[in-house]
Amino acid sequence: MSGSVMLLNEDLSALKPQAMNCARRLADWIVNTQTKDEDCVADSGNFPFIVSKDGVPRAANNWNHAFAIMGLLAAGQVFGEERYTHAAVRMGRYLGTLQIFDPFHRKHYGAFREMTAQTPWCYVRDALSAAWAMAELYRCTGKAEYLERAKLWEEWFQREGMDETGWPWWGIMFDEAFPVCLGNMRNDVHGCFHGGGLNFFYLMYRITGDRRYVGGFYEAIADRFISEIQQADGLFRSTLAATGKVPETDPQNGLHRANDDLGTLGLLGAYRVYGKAGYRDAIGRFLDCVFAAQRDDGMFEDSCAATPVVLNIVSEAAGTVGPGTARPGAASRALEALFRRQIDRPGDLWLDGGLDETGNGECCARSICYSLIVLLKLFGNSGEFLSVR
């Protein structure tokens, strides 16, 4: 069928109107909840990460802004409305206030703080996502400042961001911790989420043509991601740095399972750079595991954030690897389950149009931003984001 929407050999064209409506409402949720520009407001451009079922918002981390920026840029392109692009630029301006440039932090020049300009720490992977968004803003606007910010963060990462084995640190302290510190600094653990960090370096390589961004450190991370972090069942799990073994208790409470934090997408980029069959095969093992466990209701797990992440790598890897365990109708069931999680609360600024991520009534930017990007990719021909093409 000409102009059909295909995934897993399944024609999804009938879902396009619902998907595009869902995507627009997601983009509108971000714009509607974004802090307005006022001289007396310290966080203009900020937006909430989580809104409780009672409508109480919690401000976003740096990485939430990063994926919201990508989604808004895609929405601006697909819907042809400047307000989405303008919101992305405003968010990028806020994100820039988290980057360290003051003379009292020369060691951490170029790093991104986690939540606010005063937060005394960062998670390294989260900060990488902030730099990733800067690179995307440069690619979409051509403004040199954004690329310079991404480069400065990468230089900091090379100096301070990895342990003695070459694996990125879980987190970094910049200043003395506040009495109440929200950071869960497990630098004794090799975080499974760092596989997704490969995507930033691949993008920088694509933008600049400089192969150093996919040099030896990048290959070493990809190698360890499949040799240590990927387990026999195909999923990726954090390991103890001292032993390489999976700890008895997951330090992230099962957050990254079917949602691999874009690690298989990172492997796909590494496969295209180095051509190692091990990277390709690791993606296949992951997808087989995830689709074998897909529930009858279409969900991959309780969190609907996994749905766009899984469908994105299936789309990106088409022709290279696919899940042999996917049952007929797997993609449409997954999408329909995602649509059911969209919140209908007309007139409720904080909740209407968002996604109930885990089914407990909370609206979460994780699933909102990933879904916005991927729905616009699958149904709006916006293939530029979360992509290694």
Image: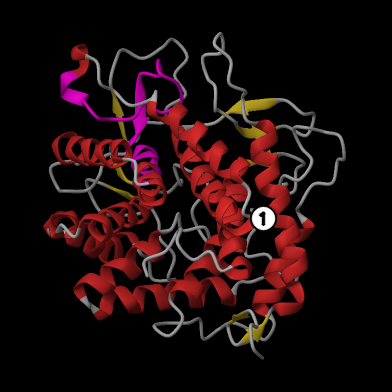
What residue span does the magenta drawing correspond to? Answer: 106-133
**Image-quadrant location for residue 120:** top left
- Quick check: 278 above or below 246? below
Q: Left or right: where does residue 350 sit relative to residue 5? A: right
Check if residue 111 falls in the magenta segment. yes
What residue is disc 1 on? Answer: 302
- Quick check: 335 above or below 198? below
Q: Check disc 1: other Cα within 10 Å, few if <14, some if 14-19, many if 20+.
A: few
Q: Residue furthest bottom?
A: 1
**Image-quadrant location for residue 306:** bottom right
Q: Left or right: where does residue 346 sit relative to residue 260? A: right
* Circle 1: residue type: Asp
Q: Left or right: where does residue 332 sit relative to residue 207? A: right
Check if residue 344 falls in the magenta segment. no
Q: Which residue is more in the foreground, 337 or 27?
A: 27
- SS state under label 1: loop
Residue 370 visible at all: no
Residue 207 spot, x, y in % from top left: 27, 56
Q: Left or right: where does residue 307 sit relative to residue 363? A: left
- Quick check: 318 above or below 104? below
